[in-house]
Amino acid sequence: MTQTLKPREGYVQAFAEFERGAAVGPSWLTPLRKAAISRFGEIGFPSRHDEEWRFSNPAAIAETPYELAQTGHGLRMTASDIASYAFEEMGGTRLVFIDGGYVPSLTVIGKLPQGAVVGSLSEAFAAHHPAIEPHLARYAKFDTAFPALNTAFLSDGAFVYIPRSAVVKEPIHLLFLTTDAGKPTVSHPRTLIVAEENSRATIVESYAGIGAGTTLTNAVTEVVVGQSANLDHYKLNRESLSAAHVATMQVQMAQQSVFSSHSINLGGSFVRNDANAVLAAEHIECTLNGLALIDGKRLVDNHTAIDHAMPNCNSHELYKFIVDEQGRGVFNGKIYVREDAQKTDAKQTNQALLLSADAQINTKPQLEIFADDVKCTHGATIGQLDPEQQFYLQSRGIPKAEARNLLIYAFASDVVSRIKVPALRAQLDAILLSELPRR
Amino acid sequence: MALLEIENLHAEVGGKEILRGINLIVNPGEVHAIMGPNGSGKSTLAGVLAGREAYSITEGAVRFKGKDLLDLEPEERAGEGVFLAFQYPVELPGVNNQYFLRSALNSVRKYRGQEPLDGVEFLKLVREKLNILHIDRELMTRPVNHGFSGGEKKRNEIFQMAVLEPQLAILDETDSGLDIDALRVVADGVNALRSPERGFVVITHYQRLLDYIVPDFVHVLSQGRIVQSGGKELALELEAKGYGWLETDAAKPELVTA
């Protein structure tokens, strides 16, 4: 029945069904969900006439009659089904979500300090965890379509809570998988990470597709970094090549906190990441780095927005795109330096390596500076493989294809070398050195 | 069998003929110096032998150990045992020297039907070669040639040569841009690698390098042809008379038969 409706109405009607059934959680969530769906009902999906979507036309998503994914399938999956996405060697804690539903049987909870919580949002709702209500859906605005839909359909997701001065040594892996339901399905994974004052943790948020389903993952992640807390975040996208992936990460940072995020995009046919950070106090260090490998006719669009609201904060951005065949990359980097944010030091770098004549990159640095004593730099470069470098490698006996991969690897190395989780870095090394082009 | 036979080699770049009938035979154990003024075709010859794409061969043949060298890809030539020390070694930021060299060595070993070296065996070999050439081990951890001084780049070329153990080494103006101390270090490295099985083609503009790497034969290249060949004395004569005589032929050094 939903297929005959226009997409916007389809989602609104699906919401009515969702409210009657799967919409569990505390009562304060209900008005938020309602506000979110009514906002979506007003604005609908963006089009490419919208400045924020100029180079990545979301029409295909808007026109696909995605149905809300059913979560039952995931409960029948076994450890071997997910082995290639699980990073067993990483150790630590792993939460597994399949098609948006939490799968306790595949979840592993490692050693955690007292008071730390890594689990599902639904468990946290049931336990009335005190960090949920003040933080959930308080930072990621739902004034645009995708976060609005995610908030409207919010029922479960990942919850990470690191209490004051706690240190979690091993990485916490949040694994979101989608499966092929034989029809287009959408899931709306939600994540809330709260790192209290002076705490430390490493989070790996990863998304992957099992099979080649037509899926849409519409994720929202909220990250709260408390005073002097230090959070190391990685996002790995290995969605299937027929999957669409739209995600917003909203980071709220307190005084002297340190946050760094690496966004690694290897999969998905249409990928849009919005990474937004609000530097709401002084002496904050914020790093947003990214690497995208784009081949076939895939598109990866990385939008970042760093809001320097207060003085004496530093931000660093390094986004690299490797684009082959008819792939397309988009980078838009906004940096706001508010009137009060004197002594801001913001550095943004965007580099693209185009491997074919049809490969494309659209890049747009967008700096809005209202303070006068600041240091803000941005740079964008676009290049190709250097034939002289390739010949040098070949002249030393390295076959042409291998030489090409080695140079691609070299291009990516200053992002990859900053990854502090060995299991993640090792897998990336292997992919970069052997898998391009992936035909 | 001769190591390298070049027969009536003609090559052009962008429709302009640069090599116009080169003939040269290099036997194992021999060091041949090729001298000549700028634009005489020295670097083109090196590039053609290593398989640089920019050149098209219009006539002639090059055989390496009896095989048609021109038919092989650059990496196959390396596998067969040809090594070119670049005039301008290429910087590879982001590529670790050790990773690069191990990939190169295991690629040529694979081509030669040998088992790849594991990490331990490779490091043992590297240490041995570093000691012979008096090169600091720290070189291995740096990105290939990136941020290297001119002297370090040339030493790295010789070091790669030592590890890959070619049968024919072509040194393209290895002396360019080096001060006398760096030149001596590089020359010592080359001399340490001289052997009865290995041939060298040393391309240079100046006689100075040949004080340190003493050649068996000297050839003078002019306008894409070898116009004169002789023993090591020819280099000294060239140094004294310069290359001006090539224009006029009047002051041609006395022919020394090789």
Image (cartoon, rainbow, N blue to C red):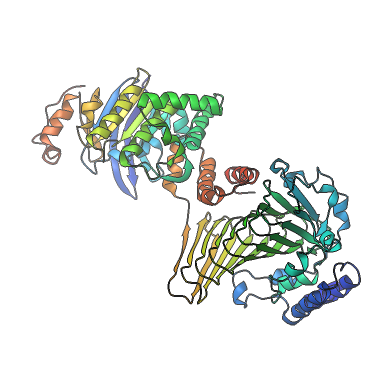
Which residue shows up at 88% across the image and 50% down it? A76
Q: Is residue A108 left or right of residue B70?
A: right
Image spot of residue A284 (x, y percent): 55, 63
| Residue B112 seen by the camera | no
Q: Is residue B122 above or below residue A109?
A: above
| Residue A30 seen by the camera | yes
Image spot of residue B178 (x, y percent): 26, 38
Which residue shows up at 68% across the image and 59% down it? A196
Residue found at the very far right of the displayed protein: A20
Q: Is residue B131 above or below residue A434?
A: above
Total marks shown come to 0
* In front of the other: B17 or B117: B117
Image spot of residue B145 (x, y percent): 39, 41
* In front of the other: B232 or A203: A203
Which residue shows up at 47% across the image and 75% down it? A371
* In front of the other: A186 or A156: A156
Image spot of residue A296 (x, y percent): 63, 56
Residue found at the very far bottom of the displayed protein: A42
Quadrant for the N terminus of chain A, please: bottom right
Residue found at the very far top of the displayed protein: B196
Q: Is residue A309 left or right of residue A386?
A: right
Which quarter of the picture shows residue B174?
top left
